[in-house]
Each structure stands twice: as C-alpha cells, then as structure tokens.
Image (tube, rainbow, N blue to C red):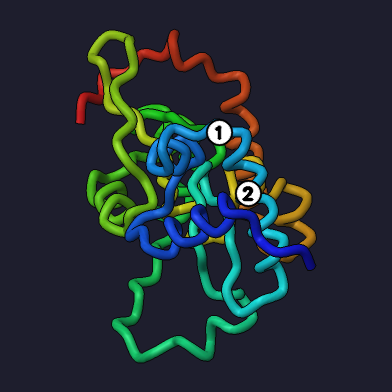
Amino acid sequence: MSEPTTLERAVEATLFASEEPMTVDALAAHLGGLAPGDVREALAALAAHYGQRGVQLVERGGRWHFETAPDLAHLLRREKEQVRRLSRAATEVLAIIAYHEPVSRAEIESIRGVQTSAGTLDVLMEAGWIRLAGRREVPGRPVIYATTPEFLDHFGLSSRRDLPGIDELRAAGLLDPVDEAMEAALDDLGQFDAGDAEDSDTD
C-alpha cells in the first residue's frame, strides 16, 4: 500500500482529535480552506485503508468519524444503563418521521389513525433520534419533526436512502398483520399534500 499523503494524515489526525463528527466543508475549513474535493479524496483513501481494521472511518448523515468495527463492538461493551425499550407507538412514530420527514404531529396522527401524545415525541427527542425542524408554513404554523445524525449513527445508516424498504422488512419477518396495515398507511402519505392539510397542531 502506498504511503499516506500529507493531506490524508492531516484529515486522519483532525478526525481522531475531534469530539464530534465533521463534514467535508468543516474539515476543509479547519485545514486552512482546502478544496472540498481534495478532502473527499483523502477521506475515500482513509476509508479504504481502515475498511478491514478494528476501527473504521464512516460517514453518517454527511459527517465523518471513526468508530469501532461492528464485529468487534462487543469486546468494548461495558456494563451500562439498560436503554428503555421503545413502545409500539414510539416505534411507529419514529418510522413515520424517518420515512417521511419533515412531518408535523397532525400528519403523523393522520398516518397512524390515532392521536400521538407529546410524551411519545419527548421520548424520541430525549433519545436524540428526532429534532424540531422548524414550522410548516400553513395556518397555525405547526412544528415539524425530522431525524438526527444520531439516529443514523445508532442504526448504522449513512443516510436515509439506506432505510430498508417494505419488501426488505417483510423478508426479514419484521412485518406482522398489524404492521401490514401500517404499511398501507405509510404509502398513503405519498398522496398526502402537507401544504393543504388542515393542521391546527401548534405543539
């Protein structure tokens, strides 16, 4: 393997020292205003170099960081507080937001067919998986929700494009008869015009 370039070493050192994942633009600015294209090339070379090692360079939601290789994570796992299991309602709400963001609470309720408590949204926000993404420009200006980079990182996704499709979920045995009804409801959102929705949700 060829020796790493000066830029690759600089990007590597910067990411190791950073407390937070960094975007290409942030890396380019930190390293003295380099061309983003050059930084992307360095990241690609480093990702290939670390591909089979104990730590890997990964991109999550447009931000890059090093993480333990998935097959070795169990070696570093220590006793920690048990993560609270999501309720079915929270799981459904998270799925709706992930597949159709940004969405308002009223839009979520329209898809689920039942009211969504503020507590359910609070649980997902406390987990760091959803965030407030502004307000819908309709009467009442309801809050809209979207997923976070932490959501992508937790589920090992580079972007929302990596979310499994309905066929994949069914093949994995993750859709029961009730979920099949949920599938139809999710499909309906494709025909749901948020801009014309009568939305009085101002939470």
Quarter occupied by residue 52: bottom right
177 to 72, vertically: above or below: above
Name the spot of residue 154 as percent of width and height, x first: 48, 62
Residue 105 seen: yes
Name the spot of residue 149 as percent of width and height, x first: 44, 48
Residue nearest the observer in this picture, 193 or 61: 61
In space, the residues marked 1 and 2 are separated at their CA atoms by 10 Å
Q: Which residue is mark 1?
A: 36
As helix, strand or loop, the secondary structure at mark 1 comes to helix
The residue drawn where x is 26% and y is 25% is: 201
126 to 132, vertically: above or below: below
- Categorize mark 2 by other alpha carbons within 10 Å: few (<14), some (14-19), many (20+): many
110 to 80, vertically: above or below: above
Amino acid of disc 1: Pro
- Categorize mark 1 by other alpha carbons within 10 Å: few (<14), some (14-19), many (20+): some
Quarter occupied by residue 77: bottom left
Left or right of 184, for residue 68:
left
Residue 176 seen: no
The residue drawn where x is 30% and y is 47% is: 121
Q: Which residue is mark 2?
A: 42
Between disc 1 and disc 2, whose residue precedes? 1
Residue nearest the observer in this picture, 164 or 1: 1
The residue drawn where x is 48% and y is 50% is: 92
Name the spot of residue 49 as percent of width and height, x first: 70, 65
Residue nearest the observer in this picture, 86 or 40: 40
Left or right of 141, for residue 52:
right
Left or right of 31, for residue 119:
left
Name the spot of residue 157 as percent of width and height, x first: 59, 54
Quadrant placement of the N terminus? bottom right
Residue nearest the observer in this picture, 82 or 200: 82
Number of marks present in the image shown? 2
